[in-house]
Amino acid sequence: MHWRSIRKYFNLQLLKNLVGIVIGASIVSASINALIIPNHIADGGLTGIAIILHYLFNWPVSWAVFLLNLPLFILGFRMVGRNFLILSIVGVGVLSATLSLTAQLPTLTDDVLLAAMFGGVLTGIGMGIIFRSRGSLGGTDILAVLFARTTPFSVGQIILAIDAVIFIGVAVLFRPEMAMYAMIYMFIATRVVDLVQEGLSHSKSVMVVTSNPQKIANEIMEKLGRGVTFFLASGAFSGQAKQVVYCVINRTELSQIKEIVREQDPQAFMAISEVPEVVGEGFSSWRGH
């Protein structure tokens, strides 16, 4: 029974991931076909190259995306992780299919700036859903992983360099404004991906260096209902041993915890940091992560 439950869970999780990849790829494809291509905006990565080939030779973007990725799949078969490669193949296959299915969508706007902005939002949402579903769109991700193993550069630096070359090519082949709109589009898409991945309900982590750690901890647990952790620390100048109070709270609770610390120890040192995402009791559940 135990093993059946595990298998059922993984089958359900796999199904949820596949549905998420399909939904995310459909949103990205709709953005490309209804906003990006009609307004002659470029994109980064291999999808950007596929769009440029469409502008130059009227090749279908769906087929160009698949064919450009094919040699990378063959090249990366033994050099990148099996799971990463499989997810990349699934992601690219679904993206190619949805690009073909949404090719006849009407143009949503003829304003290039609006198209770049809202195209970035839609693409970011779609890509964020794909990444949350453990998917990948392959392309320059695979190329970057391969180069990162033989060069001193990181994957992020290589992807940035590839996109820069593509945007320079767009500026030379077409016009500089086209590359500028493409950069606006990519910037917004990247930021939205982060929002989708991390969520909008940012929390706060609080560290308090105090001589009354137990009193502060008790007040936090009693009034806010938050768990508290103690860290042992010592002052570099005084050498005095102290306990650091650590907890994670919602934004609405920040003023309350400040009041608690002020009342219990006005001499305390308090550091507050942004926490993009928190998973666990009192915050978001592990379901869907």
Image: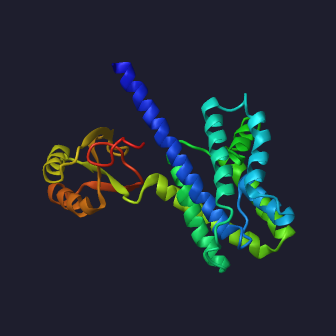
5 to 235, vertically: above or below: above
Q: Is residue 91 left or right of residue 8?
A: right
Q: Quadrant of the N terminus?
A: top left
Residue, x 58% and y 56% (percent of image)?
26
User: In terms of depth relative to the viewer, which is nearer, 35 or 270?
Assistant: 35
Indicate whether 288 appears above or below 187: above
Residue 98: x, y in percent? 63, 54
Q: Is residue 152 visible?
A: no
Residue 152 figure quarter: top right
Along the line of sight, the residue nearer the viewer: 193 or 156: 193
For the point 43% across and 25% down, the residue is 7
In the image, residue 86 above or below residue 276: above
The count of marks equals 0
Question: For this view, does 181 lie left or right of residue 209?
Answer: right
Q: Residue at (14%, 53%) from the top-left corner?
A: 223
Q: Within the image, what quadrant is residue 231 found in?
A: top left
Percent position of residue 289, x then y: 42, 42
Residue 18 is situated, as x and y percent measured from the top left of the image, at 53, 42
Up-down: is 89 above or below 200? above
Q: Position of residue 149 (x, y in %)?
A: 72, 35
Residue 90 in which image quadrant? top right
Residue at 42 percent across and 56 percent down: it is 199
Query: From the viewer's perspective, is 216 left or right of 206?
Result: left
**Residue 195 is at least partly visible in this image:** yes
Asked which colour scheme the image uses, the reply is: rainbow
